Image (cartoon, rainbow, N blue to C red):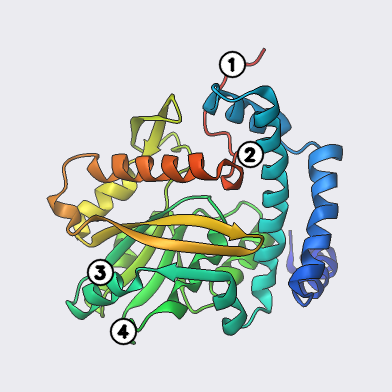
Amino acid sequence: MNKIVEKIVYSPLNALLHGLAHLPFGALYVVSDCLCFVVHRVARYRRRIVEANINASFPEKSERERREIVDKFYHHFCDTFVETVKLLHISEEEMRQHMRFVGCEQIEEYVRQGRSVAVYAAHFGNWEWLTSIVLWGDFGENVQFSQVYRPLRNKWFDEFYFRLRSRFNTVSIPKTNVLRTLLRFRGTGGYVTGFISDQKPSHNDGHHSVEFLGQPTPFITGTELILRKLDPAVMVFDVEKTSRGHYTIKLVKIADSAAATREYEITDTFARQLEQNIRRQPEIWLWSHNRWRRPKH
């Protein structure tokens, strides 16, 4: 799509999203409720995948309990969308009222020692708001905050989300350039980098099978391989949604030295932590992701 056509097609959408981002949170959640009805009840967006994933992960729950998780998931899914759009115009003060990070002094200590830090994350809670961690500590001027991402196929949306993820001056690193980029950051003051590692591995990615939510589940191992070469400290986000639009994120240490860990130790620990989070608040994980391949009936 050339630039002129792209401008014609996406300019109204861009204006709509900016208008949405100016709304107060109360009005945003009214929009989210309306959107939820359309996505869940009318379009039935990935309904089969969501139901199949939840049913297989919680066989011990009743059918009514699993339906409640499905319903709550779609509400949270739409909340996450409007909250993410809000990044276009939210202030730092308002962001701090909605995202509370606990344990950032651990990162501060590593930074004072000249160490870098890798943080495992998941599509849990509002993962797009995690970049606001930079507002919660005195990390120094030379440490580069960043996050690894998979570029989207749609160029306009890829650039749109790139801008959102840069809202608090963090750098988005395409997954194909991770090692080279982090080596550069390490040589110029260090890095604190987030890795969202709960997606199904691509065909060309190495993987390790973990018993996860009662099912053999492949987890990405490329992250761990890179970290064992770079040897940062490794942490994980423990996420809790305390109320609508409010989250508390605790930083939990996995390893003081990635290079000193056993093979798959980091991946296994991340999987256990994520499962604990999901069992505590199942509705705020991204169940619409086709995490497990299931036979068609």
Pointer 4: residues within 10 angstroms few (<14), some, or many (20+)?
A: few
Distance CA(mark 3)–CA(mark 2): 33 Å
Q: Between marks 2 and 4, how big is the CA–CA gap?
A: 38 Å
108 relative to 159, above or below: below
Give whichever of discs 1 and 4 has the lower sequence position.
4
Kindly identify the amino acid type of the residue bearing the numbered disc 4: Asn
Near-viewer residue (170 or 31) = 31
Q: Name the residue under label 1.
A: 295
The disc placed on residue 288 is 2
Q: Determine contact: label 2, label 4, CB under 8 Å.
A: no
The circle drawn on residue 142 is 4
The secondary structure type at the circle numbered 2 is loop
Name the residue type under label 3: Ser
- Furthest toward the left, the residue is 260
For image coordinates 79% across by 75% down, the residue present is 23
Does residue 238 lie above or below 56 as drawn?
below
Give whichever of 129, 105 is nearer the camera. Answer: 105
Sequence-first tag of 1 and 3: 3
